[in-house]
Every structure is written in structure tokens, then in C-alpha cells.
Image (cartoon, helix red, strand yellow):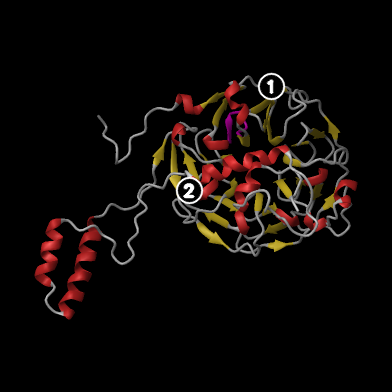
Amino acid sequence: MKDARPHAPEVLTATGLPDSHWQSVENRAVQPCSDVSFGASNRNGMAGAAHFLGMISRASCGVSAADPLIAFQRILVMTSHRRMLATTFLCLWALSWLPTATAQEVAPDQIRGNLFSACLVTDDVGWMVGELGHILRTENGGRTWMRQQAGIKKPLLAISCLDDETAWIGGKSGILYRTTDGGGTWEALASGTTKHIFDLDFCNAQHGVAVGDWGLLMYTEDGGNRWSDIGMPADLTLSPMAEDIGLEPDDIILYAVTMPDDTHGWTVGEFGTIMATNDGGRTWRQQRSPVDTTLFGVHFDNRHEGWAVGTDAEILHTQDGGVTWRRIDAPHKQRSYYDVALRGRQGWIAGDAGTLLRSRDHGRTWIVEPLPIELAASWFRALALRPDGRGLAAGAHGLLYRIDNGTARDLRLDAAPVLNDRQDPS
């Protein structure tokens, strides 16, 4: 039967299956929901993604021979022994003339795939990740991006960056990668799970937490080399709605996690689930939630004050570390909100139907950021803010906005032509 629960846009992309097949097992029920309408566009977007520049298959010496090579080969290939030597020589000679694979620089209006997560380590340097294994790094605040490669085509759903050299990525089927050289190379890590990782957060070079599908909840204390999957608390109290469709605690999807320091953290997910840790992720306790709808995003400034957002335009706020959560009025009542971020007095919320909300009073009140009506068919999924309030908002089909001075502008409209080795500089 069909899973009726609302999901973030990346869920369908992560599975690569139509919603009628997604998690169609063991009492997952009932009817369609509005968020799943993004599924078709996600799948079409995956099919049309561009190939990376410089990806050259060199298996079996796959070199296109020019006329001089063919003539040379005909002269040398006289015996089986000479034929082998000639072929080896030609492969090595031809490969020595091939250009090495280099990162491709692209402008924002050249980015087409869905983007699911972003981070910034300075006003200029940051990353975004998305479907088909897309990794993009900027060193000029988002004006241009360099494509990086981890050697996979699976959806990448979450990124956490510590500095301009160090970052971690999580995604479909438990894939995990780490870079310590600014993305020049991405090292595959053993997560110990095949569940989708929907979010992860590192508060320092050693300690991180990851959450995701089917109650995935795990932590590392050595930079991601080893992970401990602790699962959902056995005493988790499910909402009546979750119990009505036969779910167990380990069935709950966790969508977001935040670690403001190396001991305190919060995670949120389906049916209003909110949990907190005060021992770096080793153990988690449930907090009382005023809602039973799905929460997709969470952000804490410190161990005391935080926000959570989700479906049905829910915005929650706490000032006591989650002991109590209260609702905040939202300007849109029929929207899903996917991410929230605040720095100082500036705050932003990203959501469906091309929605960005902003706050100028540290999240006490929220107003709609005026955006073109054409974005109503799209969605924002990821926010990244610096301490000065500057940042990025990213989403469907390369949707990318720069946040600056309390306003948001479309970087695709500001994009300048980008030249690469296949373009004529004239």
C-alpha cells in the first residue's frame, strides 16, 4: 500500500522509485499527499542531468586514434609479440596527450539538478550537494561553482562543512564521504547502514551525528571512520496517528539534526518527533511536541534557543532547550517548510511553492520574502547562513538565491558567462 505521509523533496529522489513503490511494505498506508507531487519532476531532472566535463573512460585504452597513430600501428604490428608491445606503447603514448580530468566551473544558471543541502564556511567558500552525485563548491560567494566528484551518481542529501578544507556528505543507501583537501578528493566512509542519510552535522573534526530513514540515528567520535547506530529510544511515545497506521519507533523518519556544541543536539522528524541529546549523541530523549505533523528542519543557536519547521506551515520555537516548545504564527497557512536558519537578528525559512520567509527580530515574527510568481511550481530545500546574516538558499532544478543584507536575490539572473576549455574566449 502507498505511504501517505508527507516527505521532503529528496525522499523520492533518494529512492529513485515512483511514490506508488516507495516503502510499499508492512502496513505503510494510505493516500497521496501534496509533497509527493514533486516526485515526477525529481525523476525527470535526474534523467536530464549533464555529464561532468573531463570524465574520460580509459579502460582498454579507449583512445580515438588519429591518422598518424593508425599508420604507426600498422607498421609495428607484425607478430603477436610485437602487436602486444605496439598496443601497449600506443596506449601509453596517446594517454600522455589526453588532458587530465579537472573540475568544471559553472555559473548558477548552468546548474540544473535538484539541490538538497548547502553549507558555508566563509562568506565566499561553501558547498552544495544534490541528485546524481552532484557536488559543487564556490569560492566567491556563489557567483560561480566548481563541480567536484566523489565517483558516484547516487543522490547526495546532506553536507556538513567545518572549514574550507573539511566536509562530510551523506546520501542514499547510507553513503558517506569526507574531504580534508577542500573537495579535491572525497574519501568513502563505512557508515554501517544502507538506510538513507537525510542529514548530518559535525560540531568539530571528530564528533558528528547523522539521521535518516527508518529511525536511523548514529554518531561518530573519530571524524567518521567508525559510526555507532543507536536507533530510536525504546521508550519513544508515538502519536495516535502513527499508532493508527501500525508504526513502531524504528519506522519513524528523522529529517534533520543540529549540534550547536559537542554535547548538545536536537533531531526532528515525522509525527512531530523531537529528540535531544546532552552527551554528544550517545543517548537521546524525547521532548514534548505541540504538533503531530512532520518536522523537516531544526536549528539551534546554542543549548537553549532553537526553532523547528515542517508541514502545515508549522514554526516552533523554544528558549529552554526544548523543555517547552510553542507555535509561532506563519504568514502562509498551506505550505510545507523544509529548513530554518538564524544568525543574530536575521532568520530565514525555506519551503515549497517557492517560499522564503525572513525574520529581522531573531525569529519572533516572520514575513514573506517577495519572489517571482513563477517560483510557485518550485521549492527551496536548503539554507546556509554565516554569522553576519549572509548566505544561500537552494532547491529544485538548480534554484539558487543569495541572501545579503536581509534580502534574497536570484543568482541565476546575476550569472556572468563562464569560460572553460571548450569555449572560445572571444
The residue that appears at 41% across and 47% down in the rendered structure is 51
**Can you see residue 357?**
yes
Identify which amino acid the numbered label 2 is placed on: Gly
Q: Tell me how far mark 1 sits from mark 2, CA to CA.
A: 35 Å
The residue that appears at 85% across and 36% down in the rendered structure is 325
The residue that appears at 43% across and 27% down in the rendered structure is 415
Identify which amino acid the numbered label 1 is placed on: Val
Instruction: Tell me the element at label 2.
Output: loop
Residue identified by numbered label 1: 368
Query: Where is residue 85 shown, x and y percent of the image?
Result: 19, 74
Instruction: Tell me the element at label 1.
Output: strand
**Crowd around label 1: few <14 · some 14–19 · many ≥20 (10 Å):** some
Q: Nearer the viewer, residue 301 or 410?
A: 410
In the figure, 163 relative to 224: above or below? above
The residue that appears at 88% across and 43% down in the rendered structure is 288
Which of the 4 image quadrants contains residue 235?
Answer: bottom right
**Crowd around label 2: few <14 · some 14–19 · many ≥20 (10 Å):** some
Query: Where is residue 239 shown, x and y percent of the image?
Result: 88, 47
Query: Where is residue 408 shown, x and y percent of the image?
Result: 58, 24
Query: Where is residue 68 shown, x and y percent of the image?
Result: 12, 58
Camera-near label (1 vs 2) is: 1
Residue 391 on the magenta segment? yes
Q: Is residue 269 left or right of residue 170?
A: right
Q: For residue 211, which numbered disc appears in the image?
A: none
Which range is magenta?
Answer: 385-395
Residue identified by numbered label 2: 182
Q: Nearer the viewer, residue 277 or 55?
A: 55
| Quadrant of the drawing holding the C terminus | top left
